[in-house]
Image (tube, coloured by chain):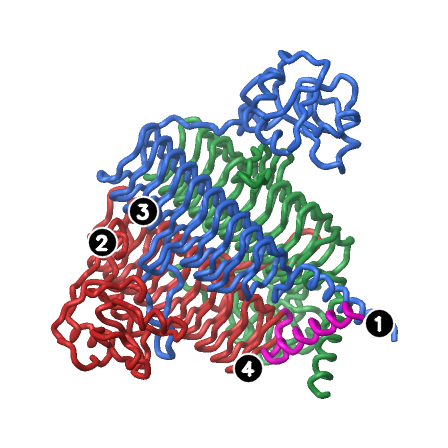
Chain colours: A blue, B red, C green
Amino acid sequence: MADPRFFAAAGPFALSRLCEIARAELGGGVDPEAHFFDVAPLDRAGSREVSFLDNRRYLESFVRSEAGACVVHRDLAVRAPDGMALLLSTEPYRAYARIAQAFYPDVVPESGIADGAFVHATARLGDDCSVEPGAVIGPGAELGRRCRVGSNAVIGPGVVLGDDCRIGPCASLLFCLLGNRVVIHAGVRIGQDGFGFAPGPEAHEKVPQLGRVLIEDDVEIGANTTIDRGSGPDTVIGSGTKIDNLVQIAHNVQLGSGCIIVSQVGISGSTKVGQLVMMGGQAGLTGHLKIGSGARIGAQAGVMRDVDPGATVMGSPAQPVKEYWRQVAMVSGLAKKRKGS
Amino acid sequence: MADPRFFAAAGPFALSRLCEIARAELGGGVDPEAHFFDVAPLDRAGSREVSFLDNRRYLESFVRSEAGACVVHRDLAVRAPDGMALLLSTEPYRAYARIAQAFYPDVVPESGIADGAFVHATARLGDDCSVEPGAVIGPGAELGRRCRVGSNAVIGPGVVLGDDCRIGPCASLLFCLLGNRVVIHAGVRIGQDGFGFAPGPEAHEKVPQLGRVLIEDDVEIGANTTIDRGSGPDTVIGSGTKIDNLVQIAHNVQLGSGCIIVSQVGISGSTKVGQLVMMGGQAGLTGHLKIGSGARIGAQAGVMRDVDPGATVMGSPAQPVKEYWRQVAMVSGLAKKRKGS
Amino acid sequence: MADPRFFAAAGPFALSRLCEIARAELGGGVDPEAHFFDVAPLDRAGSREVSFLDNRRYLESFVRSEAGACVVHRDLAVRAPDGMALLLSTEPYRAYARIAQAFYPDVVPESGIADGAFVHATARLGDDCSVEPGAVIGPGAELGRRCRVGSNAVIGPGVVLGDDCRIGPCASLLFCLLGNRVVIHAGVRIGQDGFGFAPGPEAHEKVPQLGRVLIEDDVEIGANTTIDRGSGPDTVIGSGTKIDNLVQIAHNVQLGSGCIIVSQVGISGSTKVGQLVMMGGQAGLTGHLKIGSGARIGAQAGVMRDVDPGATVMGSPAQPVKEYWRQVAMVSGLAKKRKGS
């Protein structure tokens, strides 16, 4: 059970309701009105809890589990222990995610502006927003309905948020427009000047950065990540894209929808990324590249050239994945041979 | 045109005035008193806007541009479309930067200490400073004239700022002395304890960090960058140096003047860097190195040895640039040969 | 002498007292009641100051030093200049660290809750805590004795701190339990949602993150570092572990006690790290690994496999250290041969 200091479980839910939530089918021989009270891992779940099996590596735990109910792929249902209620799904992890969301919905704070928050007289807040102590909302800012602004967060002048946005503590948003259901974690920096200088031996001349950051619906941005505003064009984060902690996104970068960008990635200025691109941790991309939709970029890769749609690259400088592993094997093999000789 | 929610264009300016600003020469056959209202890219500029051509890659856009005026190198002036006023410069990008600065000067907020800012009674502020809501200025801090402190920023006890400094929202400055015109972006951390421990199997003994961070004139520091204070000597950032987002600068590092440090670089303790050094994104330097003036360090390089003045290094471990590319080509070639055999 | 704007030296201390503090033995021929007033490096110390020699590289400075007293290994005592009082230790750097701590103890602010701090009515603070302006302490939070919460820091609902914890300015702590003497630097982000999504082509389904972050005694965490809470299990940082700036620690990671994690390291989800492990700057570890106690991971290493206890690995992909250097030498040698041919 999750620590009650921090989490409060909703429920209980009937199996029939859980199947609706999970978009799963109820296995035979069980009472659809039986109620369940929580989620738990296979090895810790009891008779009143729901678990899941997604990875065959945990099949043994499934076989021995005392979970009262379990989300599982139809193919593995025959391995279930006696008496376990089964919620059959072709996507058990996604189905479990929905059930866990139902048991642990976002805690909605009381709406209102806390004492010690600073909301400028010309800012406009939609219904049912909550603004925590120390948050600052600047002149002309506009928040949609049910937005939540964490303690000591800063919403700059003119910034626009859609409905149901969540801004973590100590984040700062400047020169940006957010869609709906955007989640910004603690310490995120959005919209500051990009790194734009016309370099010279006597002084690097600052180039005014006149664009914005556009963040589409359902984007989530991890803690202490930085996204600079455009220099003239905008910096754009496509809908549903998920960005991890400590990522750097430079001015004029465009990320398509549904991308997954793992922690500490750096994307240089004006690079354009398609849809559903995945980037592993600490990968770096130089500027002005085109990364095709569905491409996969390995952790720590150093990408200096365009990447084709659907391609996978690894290494620094980045290579097609097969080429990369062939090089790694060749270098390792030659070095061992040398040692032997 | 830049989004008027965030930007207000100054101007209009006469061509003659723009030439002064840009340090450019006005091409023939145009009225020096014709007025212009904004800047814009070549492909979007209209008859009352100023654009620029810096990179021959965009020559085609220049030839077709409808911009009323354009900053361009003399050598390319003959390619200009009819009727375009030309501002001739040997450094078109720098010239354009100055014009863009004139159209979009820093917005100077009303001076004064906002409600909800906390300025200690013993802090001293020069004339015309502005302190936004939630900012905290500690005991004994001294700010020069026209400094601006963003919302929820923290200026620690005894910290000194010169004139015209800008501190972004949520930044924190401790144990540091800043020159004039220093720009600190959101979430920057300056002056915390360096990572100084005398390691041991039972406990790592903390070594008190008794130095400061000295930041000279015209330095700019990107969002969420961290600069630790010295352990006894000071950490020093030389004048005019520009540091991007999420950079780590450890205790006792000395950066010379005019350096450009791209995002996510890490510089370990006591490394000394000359003037006008450039470091690409995600490069890492070990401690106690000497990096000569004018050196260039490639993105993702791993520098473990001193670098000579003017040298260019790449790779991890870092190599002279020619050596690096020779190695990359050799590994790639051998791996392909193996595949073929 | 340290800048008196920022530091106030305690003392003076008698040599006999300094020996107790340092756990050192006083060399012969000196007055144990002679008093000393400060610490300083060998080349700057005067007759009333204490210095140290730890690294033979500085032997020449030792021989010429005018320091009145010096911490040194017994083996080097014979090289001391005439009249220098010696504090003999087998661990001179650790001994010096203790002396420097005595001269420069943590400055304890006046206890109390500053004007402009926001402490929820249901939060409980132990005796002698200090809370600076703009800090926010949420409902149900519990702080031990003598905790210090910096300006604009945020302690979330239900968070628990032991005794003598120090929270830097602008840090945020959510969903976490801290032991005693934990030091959190400025801008640290603890306890936000981990990067947990069940990916899919239409939408990445968020997986509720139901664990916490447990931080044991004597941990120190550097500026702008991010530590996500567990997804169900907890994220754990073992006692005495020291983490540098801008490090990323993902959900469910477990770090053993006494680890040293240098700046910009990234550790992916569910990786388990033993005791006394050292990781160099910018190293990256993929998820679900086991890193044995005493292992050493080189700077910029890319670790994709388990690492044995006591092993040293370098490179990306990470190799045993000998193998790594053999490969580097082989590649360099072959490339040079090609050039020659």
Identity of the residue drawn at 58% across and 17% down = A12
Mark 4 = which residue?
B308
Mark 1 belongs to which amino acid? Answer: Lys
Mark 2 belongs to which amino acid? Answer: Pro
Mark 1 = which residue?
A337
Q: Residues under labels 4 and 1: Cα distance?
A: 35 Å
Mark 2 = which residue?
B109
Q: What type of secondary structure mainly makes up the magenta span?
A: helix
Q: Which residues are magenta?
A: B316-341
Front of the two marks 3 and 4: 3
Mark earlier in primary sequence (4, 2): 2
In the rendered structure, the residue with mark 1 lies on which chain?
A: A
In the rendered structure, the residue with mark 2 lies on which chain?
A: B
Front of the two marks 3 and 1: 1
Question: Marks 1 and 2: CB-CB under 8 Å?
Answer: no
Residue A200 image offset from top left, x and y in percent: 37, 77
Badge 2 density bin: few <14, some 14–19, many ≥20, Cα 10 Å: few
Front of the two marks 1 and 2: 1
Q: Residues under labels 4 and 2: Cα distance?
A: 45 Å
Q: Tell me: A221 left or right of C97.
A: left
Residue C164 lies within the magenta run: no
Question: Marks 3 and 2: CB-CB under 8 Å?
Answer: no
Q: Residues under labels 3 and 1: Cα distance?
A: 61 Å
Front of the two marks 3 and 2: 3
- The quarter of the picture where the N terminus of chain A appears is top right
Residue B145 image offset from top left, x and y in percent: 23, 62
Badge 3 density bin: few <14, some 14–19, many ≥20, Cα 10 Å: many
